[in-house]
Image (cartoon, rainbow, N blue to C red):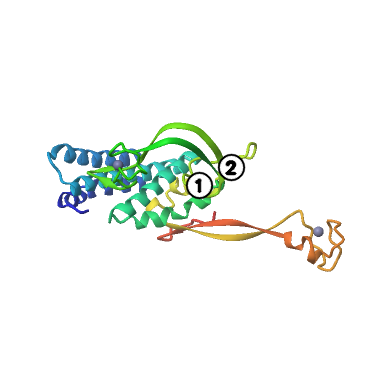
Amino acid sequence: MKSDGGKALFTALQKPVRNCLQGIDALEFDRSKAAVEEAQAILKQQHDGGASYDEDTLNDLAILGFFARFLSEYAAFWERVTKREYEPSWMALQDTLDSIRLLKRMSMIDVARFEKQLGQLEQVYPYKIFASVGCIAERIECSICGKDIDSFECLHRRGELYMGKMAHGIVRNMKKFDHVALTENPEDKRCVMQVQGTPYQFPAIDWLAENLTARKFTVSDISHVEMSERRKRNENIIRQGRNDPCQCGSGKKFKHCCSAKQYSTYPHGEFILLRKPPRVTQSV
Ligand SMILES: [Zn+2]
Ligand SMILES: [Zn+2]
């Protein structure tokens, strides 16, 4: 927080923040939502009450608004996980990660704990390929000054705050959709692709939902996810002597042919807890 007003407000928000996080741990998500609304009401009251705030105060108010939004997204994520709403939980995870990145970039608010907890969580989802849409726009307008954001006339930078408002580009006159690309690393991971007829499995989310609702541990007990590679035997490859002719009929020796396909690797995620709860397996 750059301004005194911002610092005081951040202190005033501590109680609703605590309430929100306690609500998540208790799986009382209505309580979390009420706490976020309380935080937003405090911010709104402050915003409406100020006749002529300086830029630092307005920017701090905007940042605290992002922080309140982060809390509501974080609560929504865990609510969807416990309800086994798989795809919505993925969307909420993306919202939450975006907000964490934003808060890290713009403020000194400590979100390291959340970043650590959620940072690897994307990898336990089965989504690996995404659609990315390309399009051609006539011009991209600056949300602050209305001029072409890429021209020299606009002095604003995308993603920066100006008097409490964030500069972003507004697409004007979309000419045409150029292409849809499939990619593993899109800018926005919300557009997930699914192959028809092969429903995704979410064992890790099921595991979380089961243990959280059974009160084996709470959300704040989860430190982070540790990813590793595991090996499994390929049932289609029959074990045979290394120097025997290969079963596939290639004429080569087994060791030079299908031996390499005996095992395949798959990603394995393990949830690391901050305290050891009674009777809980951590493997998923
Ligand atoms: Zn501008
Ligand atoms: Zn072979």
Give whichever of 189, 68 is nearer the camera: 189
* Badge 1 element: loop
Q: Which residue is mark 2?
A: 200
**x and y percentages locating residue 238 in the rendered image:** 79, 58
Which is more toward the observer, 124 or 190? 190
The kind of residue on which mark 1 rests is Pro
Position in image of residue 16 (x %, y %): 25, 45
Is residue 254 visible to us here? yes
Locate the C terminus by quadrant.
bottom right
Q: Amino acid at mark 2?
A: Tyr
Label 1 vs 2, first from the N-terminus:
1
Alpha-carbon neighbours of circle 2 within 10 Å: few (<14), some, or many (≥20)? few
Residue reaching furthest to the left: 51
Q: Is residue 208 left or right of residue 158?
A: right
Q: Nearer the viewer, residue 148 or 249?
A: 148
Residue annotated with mark 1: 186
**Residue sitting farthest toward the bottom:** 243
Q: Is residue 142 left or right of residue 213?
A: left
Q: Residue at x 49, y 44 (%)?
A: 189
Note whether 175 is above or below 8 in the view shown: above
Q: Secondary structure at mark 2?
A: loop
Q: Position of residue 261 (x, y in %)?
A: 73, 59
Residue at (36% x, 40% y) in the render: 169
Q: Quadrant of residue 231?
A: bottom right
Q: CA distance from mark 1 to mark 2?
A: 20 Å
Q: In this rendering, does residue 221 appear at all?
A: no
Q: Nearer the viewer, residue 139 or 269?
A: 139
